[in-house]
Amino acid sequence: MKFYWQLFFIFFKIGAFTLGGGYAMLPLIEAELVNKHKWIGKKEFLDMTAMAQSAPGILAVNMAIFTGYKLRSYMGAIAATLGAVLPSFVIILLVAIFFRDFKNNPWVERIFAGIRPAVVALIAVPVFRLSRSAGITYKTIWWPVLCAVAVWWWKVSPVYIVIVAAAGGYVFCRGGKK
Amino acid sequence: MIYWQIFKTFFKIGLFNFGGGYPMISFIQNEVVLRHGWLSNAEFTDIVAVSQMTPGPVGINMATYTGYAAADNVWGAALATFAVCLPSFIVMILIARYFLKYQNKPVVQAVFKGLRPAIIGLIAAAALVLCDGQNFIDGKSYFIFAVSFFLVLRFKLHPIPLICLAGLAGIVFY
């Protein structure tokens, strides 16, 4: 029982103190599990990270499930996931309860009128940064552009985009060429 | 039945989201704003800002808030959060049991060759959907957007100082 608490608490700490999502959490997870508690080897941690990144879902949750399961099977996975999720859940719940009353306050309105365009910029920047790192060229740019237009203009669900893209990758790149 | 809708929506988001927090914004936006209308575009943008500024994974933050807004109570929030984690649970345990070294398999590599550019397209779509009259009310909005874009792209400004600065700009401008 003590071990489950420890697992819960470690991921609780990780969930409560990392801002900005999964990638910011990875060094913290490594510090706790690999360096401090030595539950997982360095190499194994890198493999787990790669797998958690290529699986669907939320990276931090994937890491919690994977670690918990490796150490203590299903109950371990549940303890770690609860730990990772609970801080966000509680904080956002409080925000949700109060923000909905706050929203029409004129000061809050003004602040958010300034914030909204900045958020759009925040989402737009990774598009360019990722395009560079994914090696998108003028020859291949039609594919992300098509996906963007399909979702934005024709309101196609991203689910279909993911299915078609995965199938396309499988069919065209399977031979290991390219 | 709103609870079944919430569960189904977030299970789907958890199952098909690849590539982290930004593509997830596109998924949640498509389902929650465009399809179900649980949040307006402006409210959705506000929640993205709040998610960036509060600790924890962005996906969990978004699921919790949207679930609360859709059902108007705590159970909606809990259900959405549970539903978005459930596919991870199934997939990660399957991988842990049967597919170690899964990411090195040529099939997986091939699939990701196709997925990577599509994910970039999804993030672009999320940004484009957000470009509407609710978020861009006048010329000053475009000014804030341009300055923010430049600061993040050129100087890698962190989201939290950026959002604080933009909030300050809002007080000064409006």
Image (cartoon, coloured by chain):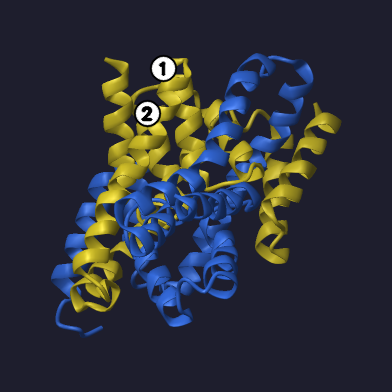
Chain colours: A blue, B yellow
Q: Quadrant of residue A156?
A: top left
Q: Residue at x 56, y 60 (%)?
A: A25
- Mark closer to the chain start, 1 or 2: 1
Place of residue A53 in the rendered image (x, y in percent of width and height, measured from the top left): 39, 64
Q: Residue at x 30, y 32 (%)?
A: B9
- In the rendered view, tell whether residue A53 sits above or below residue A178: above
Between residue B137 and residue B108, name the one nearer to us: B108
Place of residue A77 in the rendered image (x, y in percent of width and height, measured from the top left): 37, 52
Q: Nearer the viewer, mark 1 or mark 2?
A: 2
Can residue B38 be seen by looking at this rendering?
A: no
Residue marked by disc 2: B79
Residue marked by disc 1: B71
Residue type indicated by callout 1: Ala
Asked if residue A14 lies left or right of residue B139, the reply is left
- In the rendered view, tell whether residue A47 sits above or below residue B149: below
- In the rendered view, tell whether residue B126 sits above or below residue B120: above
Q: Are marks 1 and 2 in contact (CB under 8 Å)?
A: yes
Badge 1 sits on which subunit?
A: B
Q: Residue at x 40, y 22 (%)?
A: B37
Asked if residue A99 lies left or right of residue B70, the reply is right
